[in-house]
Image (tube, coloured by chain):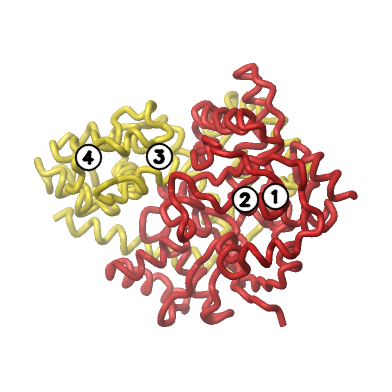
Chain colours: A yellow, B red
């Protein structure tokens, strides 16, 4: 199937809840939400969510597929786990939000300029290259993720932090040349490739 | 032979010249004092923290931690895995839980690890935070017995943050008002800020990078509450909290017209100084905002 998003639309028609249950990490929990709103009130970035978590859960049940998957909401999650700790029904809300965000991204539906969606991918690409995070390259790729001119502006704004970290021995300019790495990078990549294949195949099953 | 031995997962941020290398240094120092031996997991990899989800998804993300667990078993048998970083601890613990409870994840992980000829043998070892080792295995009493220079006259805000507190937390502690960090402040002879309002609030985590304004607003409240409680410094068990609360104070001052300049240290830094070790062993040279009061005590 050339367009995974179209495949999903056809497969599930009006049943977005089933689609989420089948394809989203911990998605089978969504139906358990009782709409109390404790999650939304507990979220450190609560005011910045286009739709707070309990609204997202209800929208899934109401079949608002495009509105949910195209929302910037889930990308506001800081992974603080306050919602999980407080949810009276024990929903793993943090994981569901991560799962929805990842699923949206796999289907290419995430908001195109969402900074956390971009950063999350930069982080993953950075760490899987050598098996360990290269903090210098991660920082630089972040500064320049919105183009060269913006990158220079951000880099200048951040120079006090960079210099401070350098002076205290917590940043190494030589990391640009390669930096930390595990020995078995080939093995790591082979393992990840397999894990991706299995996950993709699982989603493909539902493509009908 | 050391009194206590663990398999050690240092994590990316504690590598040489990385952002929390000072955390590793001070941890090694207190481990010497407490006769704890940390056996590094050979060729450990990044756990992808929490923020890796967007690129990693479920199985690839969990396979990263599974590889560490398998390598740990291979080299150190069933020794508990100890992490100093909150995210490393959380990701590895979550991976173990998911692998144990979800058969589909388990078979996926077995296949992924099979690609590189390693596997999880029998029961997976527990993954614990260094703070758990200190509290549960060493105990407050033994820690206190090592104090040579009590940090008298210092008032410290114990900033626990998120991921060392939720969703697992430290056994017996509440999510809303955990007390262990305050107790650790007390045993090194300092005074904890009572009712520190932002004790378990979020610093923005990795969103400090992608949503700096929103995250800095959170950090501003965390620092303000510490000053309100009369704190001389802030202490934390998490490398992300430490960095986020320490290094952006200049930016926050510019945005909000505040005059923040409060040191943010690790519990291990406090303990190293109280145990009578010098500034270098306590990694006081890693403070972007110098902890001058601790430097004075360390020099005495």
Q: Which residue is mark 1?
A: A175
User: Residue at (58%, 43%) from the top-left corner?
Assistant: B159
> Can residue B287 be seen at all in this image of the molecule?
yes
Task: Report, in whole angstroms, how far the alpha carbon at label 2 lies from the one at label 1.
Answer: 7 Å
**Which residue in the structure is indicated by mark 4?**
A57
Residue carrying label 2: A134
Please say if the residues under marks 4 and 3 sit with CB atoms less than 8 Å apart. Answer: no
The chain that hosts pointer 2 is A
Give above or below for A70 relative to B115: above
Q: Secondary structure at mark 1?
A: helix
Q: Do the residues under discs 2 and 1 have CB atoms within 8 angstroms?
A: yes
Splitting the image into 4 quarters, where does residue B263 fall?
top right
Mark 2 nearby-residue class (10 Å; few <14, some 14–19, many ≥20)? many
- Give the mark nearer the N terminus: 2 vs 1: 2
- The x, y position of residue A179, in whole percent, is 68, 54
Residue that badge 3 annotates: A77
- Label 3 vs 2, first from the N-terminus: 3
Tell me the distance, in whole angstroms, between the alpha carbons under discs 2 and 4.
Answer: 36 Å
The residue that appears at 23% across and 33% down in the rendered structure is A55
- Secondary element type, mark 2: loop
């Amino acid at each position: 199937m050339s367009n995974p998003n179209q495949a999903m639309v056809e497969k599930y028609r009006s049943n977005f809840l089933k689609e989420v249950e089948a394809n989203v990490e911990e998605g089978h929990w969504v139906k358990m939400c009782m709409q109390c709103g404790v999650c939304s009130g507990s979220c450190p970035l609560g005011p910045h969510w286009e739709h707070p978590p309990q609204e997202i859960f209800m929208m899934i049940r109401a079949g608002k597929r495009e509105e949910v998957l195209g929302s910037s909401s889930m990308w506001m999650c800081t992974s603080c786990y306050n919602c999980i700790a407080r949810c009276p029904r024990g929903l793993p809300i943090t994981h569901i939000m991560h799962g929805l965000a990842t699923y949206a991204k796999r289907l290419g539906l995430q908001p195109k300029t969402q900074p956390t969606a971009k950063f999350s991918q930069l982080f993953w690409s950075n760490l899987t290259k050598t098996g360990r995070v290269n903090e210098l390259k991660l920082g630089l790729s972040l500064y320049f993720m919105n183009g060269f001119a913006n990158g220079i502006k951000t880099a200048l704004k951040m120079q006090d932090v960079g210099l401070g970290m350098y002076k205290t021995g917590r940043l190494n300019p030589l990391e640009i040349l390669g930096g930390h790495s595990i020995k078995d990078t080939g093995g790591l990549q082979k393992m990840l490739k397999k894990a991706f294949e299995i996950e993709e195949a699982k989603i493909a099953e539902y493509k009908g | 032979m050391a009194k206590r031995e663990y398999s050690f997962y240092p994590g990316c941020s504690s590598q040489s010249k990385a952002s929390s290398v000072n955390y590793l240094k001070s941890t090694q120092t207190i481990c010497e004092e407490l006769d704890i031996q940390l056996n590094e997991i050979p060729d450990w990899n990044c756990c992808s923290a929490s923020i890796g989800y967007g690129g990693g998804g479920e199985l690839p993300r969990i396979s990263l931690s599974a590889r560490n667990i398998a390598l740990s078993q291979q080299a150190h048998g069933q020794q508990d895995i100890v992490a100093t970083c909150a995210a490393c601890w959380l990701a590895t613990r979550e991976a173990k839980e998911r692998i144990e409870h979800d058969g589909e994840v388990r078979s996926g992980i077995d296949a992924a690890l099979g690609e590189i000829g390693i596997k999880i043998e029998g029961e997976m070892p527990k993954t614990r935070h260094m703070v758990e080792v200190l509290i549960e295995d060493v105990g407050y009493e033994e820690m206190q017995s090592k104090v040579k220079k009590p940090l008298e006259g210092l008032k410290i805000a114990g900033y626990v943050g998120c991921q060392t507190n939720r969703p697992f937390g430290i056994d017996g502690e509440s999510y809303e008002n955990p007390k262990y960090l305050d107790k650790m402040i007390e045993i090194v002879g300092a005074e904890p800020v009572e009712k520190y309002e932002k004790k378990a609030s979020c610093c923005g985590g990795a969103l400090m990078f992608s949503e700096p304004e929103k995250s800095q607003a959170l950090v501003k409240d965390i620092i303000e509450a510490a000053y309100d409680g009369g704190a001389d410094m802030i202490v934390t068990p998490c490398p992300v909290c430490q960095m986020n609360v320490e290094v952006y104070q200049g930016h926050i001052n510019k945005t909000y017209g505040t005059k923040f300049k409060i040191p943010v240290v690790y519990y291990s830094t406090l303990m190293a100084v109280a145990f009578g070790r010098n500034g270098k062993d306590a990694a006081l040279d890693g403070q972007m905002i110098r902890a001058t009061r601790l430097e004075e005590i360390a020099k005495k």
